[in-house]
Amino acid sequence: MIVSIGLNLLKTTTTEFELIRTQPEEFVHLALDTCDKQESETVKTQAAKLLEVMCDGIDDSITFLVTFCTQALSYALAGEEEKV
């Protein structure tokens, strides 16, 4: 659930990439709301709340999340010869 739903809903959308170029201050406000305040009712902020509650309430979920993200980044940054 953490990976399939939570992380997929937190990814940066094409609209947000455009916002970075055109209105960077608005993108920063969106990021602050998602990561800290979580006041808006967007899918992204609700996914952030879900992950926060899961990590607070389920033992070892934060360990799983960090391990998964670290391994995913390592895999993505590895050369093709290391992915076999």
Image (cartoon, rainbow, N blue to C red):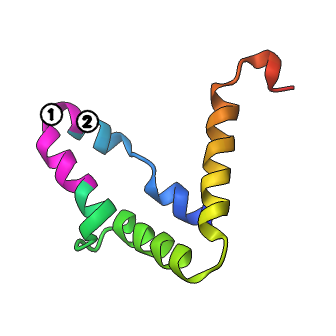
Q: Residue at x 36, y 40 (%)?
A: 14
x and y, in percent, of residue 24 in the image: 16, 38
Residue on which the image places disc 1: 22
Q: Distance between the residues labelled 1 and 2?
A: 6 Å
Q: Which amino acid does label 2 sit on?
A: Glu
Question: Taking 42 as reference, is 7 above or below it?
Answer: above
Residue 7 in magenta stretch: no
Image position of 44 (left or right of 60): left
Q: Residue at x 21, y 40 (%)?
A: 19
Q: Residue furthest bottom?
A: 57
Image quadrant in which you'd find residue 73:
top right
x and y, in percent, of residue 12 in the image: 40, 46
Residue 26 in magenta stretch: yes
Q: Nearer the viewer, residue 52 or 1?
A: 52
Which type of secondary structure does the marked residue at label 2 adopt?
A: helix
Tell me the tag on residue 18. Answer: 2
Question: Taking 2 as reference, is 41 above or below it?
Answer: below
Image position of 83 (left or right of 38): right
Q: Which residue lies furthest to the right in this view?
A: 84
Q: Residue at x 41, y 74 (%)?
A: 49
Q: Quadrant of the N terminus?
A: bottom right
Region in magenta:
20-31
Q: Quadrant of the C terminus?
A: top right
Question: Taking 52 as reference, is 82 above or below it?
Answer: above
Q: Is residue 30 shown to the viewer in this render?
A: yes
Callout count: 2
- Is the residue under label 2 in contact with that under label 1 (CB below 8 Å)? yes
